[in-house]
Image (cartoon, grey):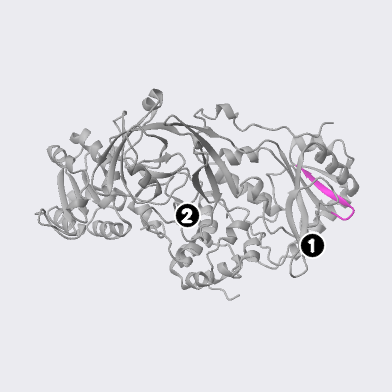
Amino acid sequence: MIFRVLDKKALREFFDLLAAENTVVGPVETGIDRKGEPLYQFEQVSDFEKLRLDYSTTKLPAKRYFLPYREKLATFKFEDHDWQKTVDFNIDRPYVFFGLHACDINALNRLDKVLLGNNYPMPYYAAKRINMFIIGVNCRPRPFCFCRSMAADSVTHGFDLFLTDIGDRYFVEIMSATAFNFLKTVRTSEPDENDHVRYMKAVAEKNKLFTARVDTSDLTKILDMEFQSPVWKQWGDKCLGCGTCANVCPTCYCYGVEETVRVDLKTADKNKTLYSCNVIDFAEVGGGHNFRPERSTRLKYRYYHKHRGFVEAFEESLCVGCGRCGEACLAGITVPEVIASVRGEEQ
Amino acid sequence: MDHRLHFHEVLPARKWQRKSDLGSFEYTYKAEITSIYKLTGYENLYRIRLVDDDDRKHFSFRPGQFIMLEAPGVGEAPFSISSSPSNHEDIELCIRTVGNLTAFLSRASRGMRVGVRGPFGTSFPMERMHGGHILLIAGGLGLAPLRSPIAHVQEHRSKFNHVDIVYGTRDPSRLLFKFQYEMWKKDDINLHIILEKADPTWAGPVGMITKVLEEIIAKRDASFIHNTYAIVCGPPVMFKFVCGMLSENGIPMQKMFVSLERRMHCGMGKCCRCNVGSTYTCLSGPVFDYWTVMNLKEAI
C-alpha cells in the first residue's frame, strides 16, 4: 500500500478535477429528521460545498447505483408470431463514489463474492462494478454501528483511495494505479512519523466509540442449534413483514422478475425488482404452497442467510454491521438484539 | 493531466449472445412448441424444439435437471425436464396449469415460440447407481421429473438390477403418462400404483404411498435393501414420510435422492427465491441426497 498525506484544501482541488470530467456520487444533506438530525443521501454532486464527508450515515445505501431497485433485464419485440430479445446492462458511464464508509465498501466486496463468483456472474452488476472509482472516507461510529463485530470496520481492498481525517490533513491510502495517476496533479506529501502517530490516534479514537456489538463466535453452529428456539416466534410476532430492512440493507440482493407487455402490444419488458425475504410471497410457488408462510420463519431465514449460509459459503458474514436495518425497522428489531436473544443473552 | 475515467464494456453489447460466462446470464434459446398433449384435466405434456439447429445439437441435459421456460411478456418459471436425455430433438415438459404462465401455456397452440434458459441444477447420479436396484417413488406431479431417469433406465436397462416405480396419486383421473405404463412393464420395470381415492374403474390398491413401500420392502432382505437406490419426488409432505421410512428400513441416506421444488426467478444462484435455509436449490439442487437434505434446515 502506498500512503500519502493530502492537505484539506487540496482535496477540494482534487474533487473539482474529478467532477469536471466524471459523474460523482457522494453523501449530501437532504433534510432534517424529526429528531432534528440531518439526513444524508448518496446523490450526484458537482459542488464540493454540498459534499458532506463528515456525514454520520445514510438512510439508504449506495445500492441503487449498482443494484437498482428496479432494472430492465431485457426487452422483447414481437413480430409475425416471433420475438427478438435484446439485453442491456444499463450503464453508460463510469461513476466516482466520493466518500463511502468502510462498511459500504465491504458490502460491495461481499456482494462481489456471490454476484461475480460461481458459474453465473451477473453482467448487470459486473458492468456497473468495473466502472466504479471509489474514494472511501473514515467515519465516527454511531451508537447502532456494529461493523467491528462483523469485521467490516476497516477495508483492505475494493476501493481506489481511502481518506482518514487526521486534523488539518487527510491520510490517504492509494489502492489503484488510476488513483495514483490522478493524484499526481494535486499536492501530496510523504507521511512523516508524526502523521503515522496521528493516524493511529484517529483509529484508536474511532474504536473507543463503538457501543453496539454482536458476538459472532460459533454463530453458524449456534444458529443451527437454535433453529427451533422460541425467540424466533417472539421476533416474528413483532415483525411487520414489510421488507424495509432489505430496502436499506447494503448487501440485500434478492430479487423477483416480472414481465409486462407494453400498451402497443408489440414490445414487452422483463424487469427485475429487488425483493425482501420478509415479504409474504417470497417463497410461494405456483399452486399456492408457501414454504415460509409465517413471519417468524421468514425473519429467521433472513438471519440464516446473512449470518450462517453466507459464512459457510464465503468465510464471512453477508451482514456488514452498518445498523441501517435496525434504525429503519418500524418494529424496532435490531440485529444485535436478535443475535443476543438467540444466544440466550440478556440485553 | 486527464482526469476522465475510462468506460469499460464488461461485454460489448453486440456480443452478448456469445456463450461466454457473462453472456449466458440472460441467454435464451428460442424454442417452438411442437405438440401439446393433454395428460389429464390438469396437466399437459408440451413438446418443444429449439429452433436453431446448432443450439439443438449442443443442448444437452442430465436426468433431474430443469430449465427456465419463458413466454415473453408473460413470465418465466422453472420446469423439470420430463424427457429422455438422449433425445436431442425435443424436450418434453409435463406442466400442471396452476398460475399465470402455465395458464397461458395451456391456451397456447402449436408453433408458438417460447424461450428456454438452462439446463440448470444438479441431476440424479445414474452412473453411480449402475448394478444396483432402483426404487423410483413419485407422488402426484412428482412423476414429471422422474420420467427422465426412468427413460435413462429403460435405455440402459441391463446396467440396473431390479427397478420399481411406486406412484401414488389422488384418483384415477389424475394418473399421468398412462400411455407409458405398458412400455415400462415391457422393459421389466415393476410399476406399483396406489390411489388415495378409488372409483368404480379402479381395481388396484388404495391408501398412502408408504403402504406399497412397506409391502415391497417386506419382501426383500437386508443386503437387497442395502444395494437399493431410491429416487423420490412429490409434494413437500411426502418427503418426510417416505424418506424417513426408507431410511429406517435400511436404505443408506447417501443412496436416496430427492428433487425439491422451490420458487425461482433466475436459476443461477442470484435471486435467492429458492433458498432452503441458505442453500440455493437451483445450484446445489434440485436433486439432493437425503443426507444433505437432512442437514438443511426447513428443507422437508
As for residue A255 lying within the magenta part, the answer is no
Q: State how far apart marks 1 and 2 are (Cα).
A: 37 Å
Q: Chain of mark 2?
A: B
Q: Which mark is residue B269?
A: none
Prevalent SS, magenta region: strand
Query: Is A127 on the left or on the right of B215, as rendered?
Result: right
Which stretch appears magenta?
A: A166-174
Identified by mark 2, the residue type is Ser
**Figure check: B297 above or below A63:** below
Q: Image quarter for residue B236? A: bottom left
Q: Which residue is mark 1?
A: A205
Q: Quadrant of residue B56?
A: top left
- Type of residue at label 1? Glu
Q: Nearer the viewer, residue B288 or A294?
A: A294
Tell me where residue A132 appears, x and y as whole percent: 69, 40
* Residue A100 visible in the snapshot: no
The local secondary structure at tag 1 comes to helix
Do discs 1 and 2 share a chain?
no
User: In the rendered view of the protein, which quadrant contains the C terminus of chain A?
Assistant: bottom right
Residue that mark 2 sits on: B278
Reply above or below: A318 against B104: below
Left or right of residue B23: residue A36:
right
Q: Is residue A172 magenta?
A: yes
**Helix, strand or loop at mark 2:** loop
Closer to viewer: mark 1 or mark 2: 2
Residue beneath the point at 54% across and 54% down? A275
